[in-house]
Image (spheres, rainbow, N blue to C red):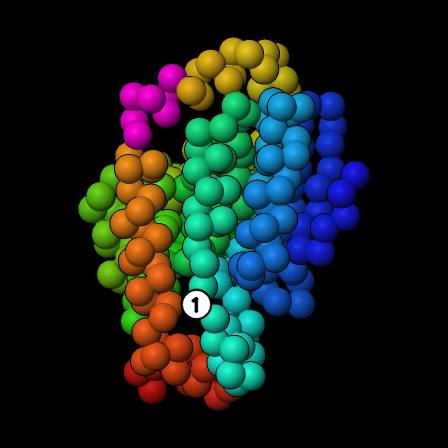
């Protein structure tokens, strides 16, 4: 099996578990993570019926790697963030020929919400909280929003973006972001996988293809989402806010 730096991958027959594994970086997203996630689907998409995306027990995924961005700024190598690989991975989770499950424990924030909203099924434990913190830094969840709006509707996604506050797993379930949760989510994940094992690869692929055809909002939103993401991550003021936060711990309004 391919050796990865930022994820752990295991198989149980046609079920693939992809664990986001950057414990020293708060499970944040960098270029390597996006590249490796996409590689898993391209490499194994024809072999899997179900893919489970999970993080660490305390944090599912906390969004962009601000420390990595700040290091690039400090070294004079402030490269523009390229969001396309990550958007393509989320698009594949939503439309690919397999069932995608987000198994959320702990914090899902900012870009981490993209993994959640893109999946067909979202399961969580009682510690799960969900937030979009981007506007605090002058950014926006440009690439997350097409997936989140598709899942919970325009106004709830709009409200989460504006308020930047975490919502509980109970509210996330009421809003339709979470499909099911339990105090210990391992049991509910096991139950779902037992049921989903009964579905055929051909049936899943045909159904997902049909659903993508009757709702093409994710593909049609891609160009605008990528352009908006590139705009906010190439803004010098925003990059300075990120660097100051990493260096001093001070939020932009402090």
Which image quarter: residue 178? top left
Residue at image x 28%, y 37%?
220
Residue 215 is inside the magenta segment? yes
Q: Is mark 1 on a helix, strand or loop?
A: loop
Camera-side residue of 241 and 152: 241
Magenta segment range? 210-216
Taking the image as shown, residue 26 lies to the left or right of residue 87, namely right
Spot occupied by residue 46 in the image (x, y as percentages of width and height) = 62, 23
Q: Can residue 121 be seen in this view?
A: no
Residue that carries the numbered disc 1 in the rendered image: 80
Q: In which quadrant of the rendered image does the N terminus lie?
A: top right
Q: In this view, does 251 lie above or below 94?
A: below
Taking the image as shown, residue 146 lies to the left or right of residue 183, namely left
Residue at image x 38%, y 44%?
172
Spot occupied by residue 215 in the image (x, y as percentages of width and height) = 30, 27
Q: In which quadrant of the rendered image does the C terminus lie?
A: bottom left
Q: Can residue 179 be seen in this view?
A: yes
Camera-side residue of 92 and 51: 92
Spot occupied by residue 236 in the image (x, y as percentages of width and height) = 34, 79
Residue most extreme to the left: 155
Q: In this view, does 251 lie above or below 95?
A: below
Residue at image x 67%, y 24%?
47
Spot occupied by residue 18 in the image (x, y as percentages of width and height) = 64, 42
Residue at image x 61%, y 67%?
25
Q: Residues within 10 Å of mark 1 (few under 14, many from 20)?
A: some
Magenta stretch, main secondary structure class? helix
Taking the image as shown, residue 220 lies to the left or right of residue 111, namely left
């Amino acid at each position: 099996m391919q050796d990865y730096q930022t994820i752990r991958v295991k198989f149980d027959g046609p079920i693939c578990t992809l664990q986001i594994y950057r414990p020293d970086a708060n499970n944040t997203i960098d270029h390597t993570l996006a590249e490796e996630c996409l590689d898993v689907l391209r490499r194994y998409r024809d072999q899997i019926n179900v893919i489970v995306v999970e993080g660490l027990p305390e944090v599912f995924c906390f969004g962009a790697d601000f420390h990595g961005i700040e290091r690039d700024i400090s070294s004079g190598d402030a490269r523009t963030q390229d969001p396309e690989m990550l958007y393509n991975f989320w698009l594949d989770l939503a439309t690919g020929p397999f069932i995608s499950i987000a198994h959320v424990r702990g914090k899902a924030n900012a870009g981490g919400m993209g993994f959640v909203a893109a999946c067909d099924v979202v399961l969580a434990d009682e510690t799960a909280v969900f937030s979009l913190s981007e506007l605090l830094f002058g950014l926006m969840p440009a690439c997350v929003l097409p997936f989140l709006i598709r899942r919970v509707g325009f106004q709830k996604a709009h409200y989460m973006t504006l308020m930047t506050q975490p919502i509980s797993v109970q509210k996330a379930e009421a809003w339709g972001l979470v499909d099911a949760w339990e105090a210990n989510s391992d049991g509910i994940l096991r139950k779902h996988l037992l049921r989903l094992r009964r579905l055929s690869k051909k049936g899943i692929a045909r159904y997902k293809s049909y659903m993508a055809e009757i709702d093409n909002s994710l593909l049609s939103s891609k160009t605008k989402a990528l352009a908006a993401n590139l705009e906010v991550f190439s803004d010098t003021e925003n990059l300075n806010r990120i660097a100051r936060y990493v260096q001093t711990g001070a939020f932009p309004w402090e």
